[in-house]
Every structure is written in C-alpha cells, then in structure tokens.
Image (cartoon, rainbow, N blue to C red):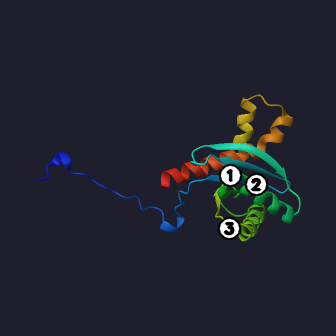
Amino acid sequence: MTTAKNKFIISFDFSFPVAYRMPMNEGKILALDWGDVRCGWALSDASQILASRHDVYYRDTLEADLEFLSETIKMHEVVEVVIGMPYNMDGSIGPQAEATLEFKTQLEAHLDIPVYDIDERLTSAEAERVMLEANLSRQKRKENRDALAAAIILQTYLDKKKRQS
C-alpha cells in the first residue's frame, strides 16, 4: 500500500540536448586562454572540482605550440581540453574568435582527447580586477593575467559540467 508519505516525485532536466552534455570523466582538464602572443593555461584537479592557475606560454610556431601542449597533456595526464572562445560582446564571432576556432580545429586534429570551447567574455577583465584587489604591480598583473583568465575559464567550465550532470 502506498501512502502520501512514501511517494517520490522524480523529474529529469532535458533542457539541453544530449549531444551538448559534457561528459564527467575522471582526470585533469587543461584550460587555455589562447592569444596571439601568449597562452595562459590552468589545470583542474583529477576530480574536476577545482581550477588552478598554472603558467603563461609565449607562443611560437604552430608546430611548437602543438608540441608544447602535447607534452603538457602527457605530463599532467590530462583527459580533456577546454579553450576560451573570445566572442564579441554581442555574441558574434570576430577575428580573434575565428583565429581561436581555427586553432581549436588544428588542436583537435593533433590530440586524441576531446577539445571543447566555452565563452570567455570578460575573463581577462575579471582576472585584472582580482589582481588589482590583491594590489599586484602592473608588471605582475601583465605576467599573470592570461593564466588567471585560464583558471577563471576552467572554473566556469567545471561548474557548468557539475550543474549539467
């Protein structure tokens, strides 16, 4: 006999198509704040809860960039990559987003792990704000902006994955 006390209501959220759901793999995720000159990068912990700022890579040739990322992925046992997509404020794709999409395509062809992108609008501004609050010098802010932006991109991605799972 079922009473009102022991009835359960089960609901499912199908607001996002299954093809757009992000998988919950165990292992580290590498995030990139890709730019023309510098690439900030950050890593998650293996349980994919926390993003940590890592470093800034000064770009070279495409081949050297891909080799650096391949070595980094192997060294840190990365299971997926997320790259910040610099859309214009109105959501359109400008020249920087086009260049990032082209790099993402080349990176996907070079790697055997998934490469995702996520909107990165205002992450550099947020990184700058955080560093100003920490009273970092102009030089220190310049040195760390891209890596901190990558950590913000990654934490946004991790939080989104958690909400969707």
Of badges 3 and 1, the one in the foreground is 3
Q: Against 126, is 88 above or below? A: below
Please report whichever mark, 1 or 2, sits nearer to the chain's N-terminal start: 2
Q: CA distance from mark 1 to mark 2?
A: 25 Å
The residue labelled by disc 3 is 112
Question: Looking at the image, do the residues carrying marks 3 and 2 touch, with CB atoms under 8 Å apart?
Answer: no
The residue labelled by disc 1 is 121
Please report whichever mark, 3 or 1, sits nearer to the chain's N-terminal start: 3
The residue tagged with tag 3: helix, strand or loop? loop
Q: Against 106, is 84 above or below? A: above
Specify the amino acid type for callout 3: Asp
The residue labelled by disc 2 is 72
Specify the amino acid type for callout 1: Arg
Residue 117 spot, x, y in % from top left: 65, 60
Query: How many labels were placed on the picture?
Result: 3
* Dot 2 alpha-carbon crowd within 10 angstroms: few under 14, some 14 to 19, many 20 or more: few
The residue tagged with tag 2: helix, strand or loop? helix
The residue tagged with tag 1: helix, strand or loop? loop
What residue appears at the point 68 percent right and 45 percent down from the top-left corner?
A: 151
What residue appears at the point 40 percent right and 58 percent down from the top-left corner?
A: 13
Residue 72 spot, x, y in % from top left: 76, 54
| Residue 164, label in figure | none
Of badges 1 and 2, the one in the foreground is 2
Say whether residue 91 is left or right of residue 8: right
Q: Residue furthest left?
A: 1
What residue appears at the point 67 percent right and 58 percent down from the top-left corner?
A: 81
Res 120 visible: no
Res 25 visible: yes
* Dot 3 alpha-carbon crowd within 10 angstroms: few under 14, some 14 to 19, many 20 or more: few
